[in-house]
Amino acid sequence: MSRVGERRLALRLYSLAVLQLSAFYDAAVLKIKHSSDFDKTKRVNFTSMSQFPSHRFSVAPMLDWTDRHCRYFHRLLTRQTLLYTEMVTTGAILFGKGDYLGYSREEQPVALQLGGSDPAALAECAARAEALGYSEINLNAGCPSDRVQNGRFGACLMAEPELVADCVAAMKEAVTIPVTVKTRIGIDDSDSYAFLQRFIEVVSQRGGCQSFTLHARKAWLSGLSPKENREIPPLDYDRVYRVKQELPHLTICINGGVKSLEEAKGHLEHVDGVMMGREAYQNPGILACVDRELFGDCAEPLAPAAAVEAMYPYIESELTKGTYLGHITRHMLGLFQGVPGARQFRRHLSENAHKAGADVEILRQALAFVSGKDT
């Protein structure tokens, strides 16, 4: 067998072992959950070890993007980064028919972002999430879409800091894992530093929240689409830095417009953590260098081609459950940016992964376009 063949076999055996361990762990957790002796304060911590906290670098919760398949793939590229779910509403969890809390153990550390404004409902959802092993609960107080506002959550909650505080307090009473808040630096014409400072002080003092992720743009609650709200309001990093300077006892993470690890390093001179959004999704190869550059991990980064090959067992397992290949591979399209053959890689997946009966062989064929070309 050639060295390439041996390497692929080793990756395949490793990925199969991880999947088997995950299945064993899931069964153990299910048994514990139904045991009368279950004590949530004794939950085992399976997160990776590092001299830095996982919030030092995270991938933002992004609707329709950071689903469980995306997070599994991202975790192959970075062991240390904190991953977030898409925002999940309390109504979906409590009354929906789908499994909105499902995830793979390999994704850890992973945080659940909740959308809602009813303290009791949020507390119930947080408790369910902790029982399933999530590492953190994050309250969405930053999404500006009309649909979210109609449900009375997201960025409009910045106008009601007392309610946000009550929501946080209720969740903290229900769980032992961290409860955090992601928000903006202002809304509409309420975009002064004093407005932001009061929001944070009320939520931290009355609600007990010790960690905030601040998108360094204000949100317009009407007149701009969610996409425009991510681009048009100007970035004000200095305002986020000032929050950390004046409230040093709080954990402050920054979000918005971060496009490189060098930029992330610059922000880390002023705040506790950096959250990267679209760049991490559209150019996931950047995540392969996070552990070394931001967490001091000496392990060699996983090459993009190796990450693709390591996905094979997971994909094969998901296909047996009825998952379509394209639902998984869509998160991998930007992996080979700047590599010869990347366009053919994307085209092959885009044209074939959605077809009935598409399997892992489609991904192998796509990978052939970039194999051996600095991957």
Image (spheres, rainbow, N blue to C red):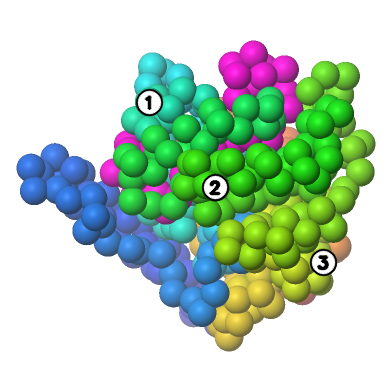
Q: Dot 2: what SS?
A: helix
| Nearer-the-camera pick, 305 or 243 | 243
Residue 3 to residue 374: above or below: below
Residue 74: x %, y % from top left: 58, 56
Of tags 3 and 2, the one toward the viewer is 2
Residue 64: x %, y % from top left: 63, 33
Give the residue pinned by disc 3.
263
Residue type pointed to by label 1: Ala
Please give the range of residues in magenta: 126-153
Cβ atoms at labels 1 and 3 below 8 Å apart:
no
Classify mark 2: residues with Cα within 10 Å, few (<14), some (14-19) or many (20+): many
Residue type pointed to by label 2: Ser
For residue 92, side relative to residue 149 (left or right):
left
Give the residue pinned by disc 1.
120
Give the total number of marks visible in the rendering.
3
At 72% from the left and 56% from the top, the residue drawn is 243
At 7% from the left and 42% from the top, the residue drawn is 36
